[in-house]
Amino acid sequence: MKTAASFGLLVLAASAQGAAAQQAGDNLTDQQKMGRQVFAQSCGVCHLPPALGARTYGPPLNKDAGGGDDDVMREFITNGTPRMPAFKYYLKPEQIEAIISYVRTVPVQAAAAPARRPGNE
Ligand code: HEC
């Protein structure tokens, strides 16, 4: 009897946790989930910090990327810059749209590195 009761509690606790995790991170559409995956694969090497607060080669991307303008973001991704490769032959247009749609869900402060810029005080 006692075992059954604590098992029930465990299940309850586990499912409550699952619900919270889903709300925090997985409240994404299928398109945004695809974008998150392509983003991690193709862009993460320069745009995602390997550790919390680590510096990245490219700027952190969030819903303000490209000044919040999807066209500007699309232009960056399609044609690149002198420091960033172009993705027009590598990604399909729908993958680029998915990335933009995903990045628009990233809150500004989540991607921001700590305000510590050596030599920039
Ligand atoms: C080789 C490293 C590298 C890779 C890979 C890369 N980027 Fe970049 N990205 C940069 C750099 C560096 C900049 C800063 C622009 C510059 O200095 O030319 C940048 C800038 C941007 C900007 C403009 C940000 C802003 O608001 O000014 C966007 C949007 C962007 N990248 C999206 C992407 C996406 C999406 C991918 C993947 C498909 C990607 N990048 C892959 C290096 C990279």
Image: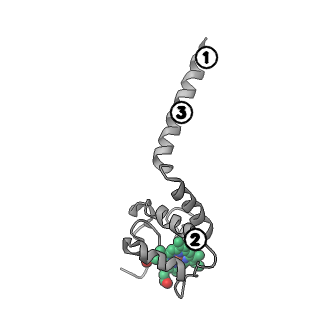
Q: Quadrant of residue 112?
A: bottom left
Q: Is residue 6 left or right of residue 117?
A: right
Element under disc 1? helix
Q: Which residue is mark 3?
A: 15
In the rendered image of this protein, does residue 82 appear above or below residue 110? below
Please, what is the three-letter code of the amino acid marked with disc 3? Ser
First in sequence, mark 2 or 1: give its number.
Answer: 1
**Label 3, label 1: how many angstroms apart (C-alpha)?**
17 Å
The reply to whether the residue tagged 2 has its Cβ within 8 angstroms of ligand 1 is yes
| Residue 68, quarter of picture | bottom left
Earlier-in-chain disc, 3 versus 1:
1
7 or 37: which is nearer to us?
37
Q: Element under label 2?
A: loop
Q: In the drawing, does residue 96 fall left or right of residue 112?
A: right
Label 2 to label 3: alpha-carbon separation: 33 Å
Q: Residue 104 versus residue 113: which sits nearer the camera?
A: 104
Q: Nearer the viewer, residue 56 or 83?
A: 83
Q: Amino acid at mark 1?
A: Ala
Q: Earlier in the sequence, mark 2 or mark 3?
A: 3
- Circles 2 and 1 in contact, beta carbons < 8 Å: no
User: What x and y, as percent, mark residue 97?
Assistant: 51, 67
Amino acid at the residue labelled 2: Cys
Q: Secondary structure at mark 3?
A: helix
**How many labels, in total?**
3
Q: Which mark is residue 4?
A: 1
Q: Residue sitting at 57 percent across and 81 percent down?
A: 86
Residue located beneath label 2 in the image: 43
Q: Which residue is located at x 46 percent, y 45 percent?
A: 23
